[in-house]
Image: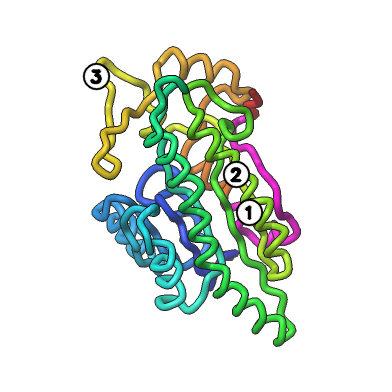
């Protein structure tokens, strides 16, 4: 039985890696999806994948930090599917440097994508959620909605070379717990999943020539030194990094009806890794 049948879900950064796995997981459980990716062709590829499996989906591609994106994203759900039930703030990347080498641009970029963009999306969703909730309450219905913000163990414990990323991910936990208190009256469960080592293109082993990704015209280095990956694997109790599908399962837990009385919580999806 599809537990999310009839639900409408927004997932940012859902063209690749963890975001794609989240979108596919929610769609497999019956949710109608609004997906997003910075790269339009990648976003459309996920649309085709979901539709080929019989799902309903539209894409609102582009940068989540663009002015006006949040309103377009939220309205796509309401205008296309007539509702809004699940929001997963997943989009992001890392742009690392030790603090003495970190520029204002680097620090602000991490705040913008990991904190400001989720804030704007949730703000844009606040009035539709209030209206839906009021109508349901007047009809004597108790309908739960879900927000899952994606943080990191770096946001819980810090990480050398990631002052900006860690600060943004820690702040997102604060936003999660505040919205839990503000939106409880609307029956919205607001929770956070903090990832440990998940195997994606951002955490691939660095080879002879380090790979880069293009983010808004910036060449951002990605990957982790092989010896560091090996060291992390040794201290993860389950003995390895996680897959995008395992990461998506953790997010799904907070989207399912079984989480209707859980809110304001942070769950670490990291194979037992506690730094």
Q: Residue drawn 40% across and 42% down?
A: 17
| Image: magenta residue range | 252-271
In reply to whether residue 260 is colored magenta, the answer given is yes
x and y, in percent, of residue 160 in the image = 52, 21
**Nearest to viewer (mark 3 / mark 1):** 3
In reply to whether residue 78 is colored magenta, the answer given is no
Residue 50 in the figure: left or right of residue 83:
left
Q: Nearer the viewer, residue 168 or 21?
A: 168
Q: Earlier in the sequence, mark 2 or mark 3?
A: 2
Q: Is residue 84 above or below residue 64?
A: below
Q: Earlier in the sequence, mark 1 or mark 2?
A: 2
Mark 2 surroundings within 10 Å by alpha-carbon count, few (fewer than 14), some (14 through 19), many (20 or more): many
Q: How many marks?
A: 3
From where the camera sits, is residue 82 visible? yes
x and y, in percent, of residue 3 in the image = 59, 64
Give the farthest residue toward the bottom.
Answer: 139
Q: Which mark is residue 193?
A: 2
Q: For the residue labelled by badge 1, is the local secondary structure a helix, a strand or a loop?
A: helix
x and y, in percent, of residue 229 in the image = 46, 19
Mark 2 and mark 3 in contact? Answer it, CB < 8 Å.
no
Mark 1 and mark 2 in contact? Answer it, CB < 8 Å.
yes
Q: Residue drawn 66% across and 68% down?
A: 144
**Nearest to viewer (mark 1 / mark 2):** 2
Mark 3 surroundings within 10 Å by alpha-carbon count, few (fewer than 14), some (14 through 19), many (20 or more): few
> Residue under circle 3?
209
Q: Residue drawn 43% across and 54% down?
A: 12
Q: Which mark is residue 115?
A: none
Between the C-alphas of marks 1 and 2, the distance is 9 Å
Mark 1 surroundings within 10 Å by alpha-carbon count, few (fewer than 14), some (14 through 19), many (20 or more): many
> Residue under circle 1?
254
Residue 52 in the figure: left or right of residue 146:
left
Q: Residue drawn 27% across and 30% down?
A: 212
């Amino acid at each position: 039985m599809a537990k999310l049948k009839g639900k409408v879900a927004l997932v940012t950064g859902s063209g690749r890696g963890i975001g794609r796995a989240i979108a596919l997981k929610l769609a497999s459980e019956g949710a109608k999806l609004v997906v997003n990716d910075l790269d339009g062709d990648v976003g459309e590829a996920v649309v085709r994948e979901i539709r080929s499996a019989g799902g309903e989906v539209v894409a609102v591609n582009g940068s989540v930090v663009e002015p006006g994106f949040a309103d377009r994203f939220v309205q796509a759900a309401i205008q296309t599917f007539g509702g809004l039930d699940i929001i997963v703030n997943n989009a992001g990347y890392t742009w690392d440097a030790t603090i003495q080498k970190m520029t204002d641009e680097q620090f602000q970029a991490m705040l913008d994508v990991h904190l400001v963009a989720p804030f704007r999306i949730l703000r844009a969703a606040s009035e539709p959620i209030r209206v839906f909730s009021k109508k349901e309450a007047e009809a004597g219905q108790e309908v739960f909605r879900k927000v899952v913000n994606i943080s990191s163990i770096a946001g819980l414990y810090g990480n050398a070379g990631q002052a900006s990323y860690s600060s943004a991910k820690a702040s997102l936990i604060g936003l999660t717990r505040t919205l839990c208190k503000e939106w409880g009256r609307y029956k919205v469960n607001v929770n956070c999943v903090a990832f440990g080592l998940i195997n994606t293109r951002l955490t691939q082993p660095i080879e002879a020539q380090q790979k880069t990704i293009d983010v808004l015209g910036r060449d951002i280095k990605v990957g982790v030194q092989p010896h560091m990956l090996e060291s992390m694997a040794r201290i993860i109790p389950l003995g390895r990094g996680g897959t995008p599908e395992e990461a998506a399962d953790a997010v799904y837990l907070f989207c399912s009806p079984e989480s209707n009385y859980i809110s304001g919580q942070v769950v670490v999806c990291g194979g037992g890794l506690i730094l």
